[in-house]
Amino acid sequence: MPSRVRVLAILAAAAGTLALAANCNADRSTRPAAPAVPAAPAALAELAELAAAGSMTASVGSDTTVDMPDAYTLHASFTDTASGPWSYTISWGDATTSAGTATDSTLGVTATHSYMREGTDTVVFTIMTSSGGGSSASDTARITLVDHVAQITVSPMSGTFDVGATVQFKAKPYGTTRNRLANRTIVWKSNRPSVATIDSGGLVTARSAGTVKITASSELETKSVTIYVVGLPFGPFHLPDSAIAKPYSGLLRAATPATLLATLKIARKNHFRVVLKLAYDSKDYSSPDSTFSLDLWKQNIDAYRAIDISSYIADGTIIGHFLIDEPRDATNWGGVPVSYADIEAAAAYSKSIWPMMPTGAGSSAGEMEAGAPFASLDFAFSQYREKKGDLATWLAGQTAAARRAGLGILLSINLLDGNIDNSTYSPSQLAAVGTVLAAEPYACGLTMWKYDSVQFADAEVKLALASIAKVANARPPHRCGPD
């Protein structure tokens, strides 16, 4: 039974025993002798034992709130009618406990605990006599732990995205103890909405080519990541590494094994898209009679087998493999055009090494249509000059032929020999032709024949190139392949 009730019962029993003894003594002269009544030593001894054990109370104060990373300090008090020492345990509510010994009840117990995550815990303080079998007391307090955002991570951490793409960004807030925090409001912001916008849920929409900073904020913390948006790849043949910069965004490059990785590294750094021509010089894969040799072409390609370009294909830096230049022009191949079967075989050989790299032939879509369908060839190459007739009519015909052949299309401007008399395009002609071709939604790129450092340094040519780049930067690129 509870100690206080037990004490009262013993006291009552002892009092009754003493009263009976007194009554017997008072009547001893007139009453017959009675059997001896046991005195109360046993009851008194039990009373003494309970008195020694004492009656205990414990208190840990009121419920409280703790701002993390501050530690919670427990100030527990207790009383006991008996003397110590006492032992105590503290259950902190997070699956951890503390224990110790107290020797002075007037000092109470003070203990500190650091919590690792926010939430609500119940602290249980229990005090007991150290001798065992004695009294004990306990009390509880409800602790509300409030953490604060100390760090935010954003994913993706960076990236290069095509105009028109939508990308879901996610932010994760972490507290002062690096635990993930729930139920936090994230505020998103784009520093250049003309390049990319972001909605309240973190969905980014790429609007035009450029660099943009995406920022996530929660409470007093922010985290920013930089992303890049690219439009239609635009740039000339044989653009040197030193010129891989605005207003261009792409290039068609004849590579060598010795220079390939250096060029790709610079292109990636500047967020360029590259069409590679790995078989560098047609003389290296021409037979003695100047006809095309598939075996010699394969030997040229084999020189790149040991060079790992897979990451550049995967991230979109490389958008195509330009297999053979003008394969259907008989004047380049000893009077015999490269057969469609050999073009397809070259495409298949490239795919056997780099399965994810699109393959293209350097002949127009109109020329390639007769060899369709193709299993491994992905795109044709159509270059405009005034001799081809009306620009709009030519462009419509080339894109229609590419679609019928199941091919994509890479467009080009013959800048050096563009006019009927094979003279160079003027800056105004370049701008007029280039802006029309750059706006073609089926094109996977726009290139020019070819880079000339003197011509491209001319102020009016620079303005023409900038006008083409403006159109290219605002439109989504098509893949170098069919729809």
Image: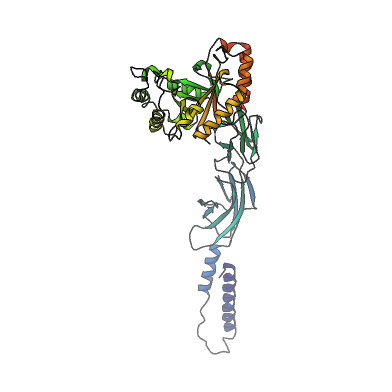
Q: Nearer the viewer, residue 68 or 251?
A: 251
Identify the residue at the far top of this view.
454
Residue 408 in the image, given as x and y percentages of width and height = 51, 31
Residue 12 in the image, given as x and y percentages of width and height = 59, 75
Residue at the spot 58% in from the left edge and 81% down from the top edge: 20
Residue 473 in the image, given as x and y percentages of width and height = 61, 26
Residue 460 visible, this angle:
yes
Instruction: Tell me the quarter of the picture where residue 153 sits.
Output: top right
Q: Is residue 14 above or below residue 411?
A: below
Q: Nearer the viewer, residue 314 or 362?
A: 362
Q: Tell me if 257 is positioned left or right of 59 in this view.
A: left
Residue 51 in the image, given as x and y percentages of width and height = 55, 65
Quadrant housing the N terminus: bottom right
Instruction: Tell me the quarter of the picture where residue 418 sits.
Output: top right
Residue 160 visible, this angle:
no
Q: Nearer the viewer, residue 21 or 106?
A: 106
In the rendered view, how is the structure colored? rainbow
Q: Nearer the viewer, residue 356 or 379?
A: 379
Q: Tell me if 257 is positioned left or right of 483 in this view.
A: left
How many numbered dots are placed on residues in this image?
0
Q: Tell me if 142 is positioned left or right of 330 in this view.
A: right
Residue at the spot 62% in from the left edge and 16% down from the top edge: 429
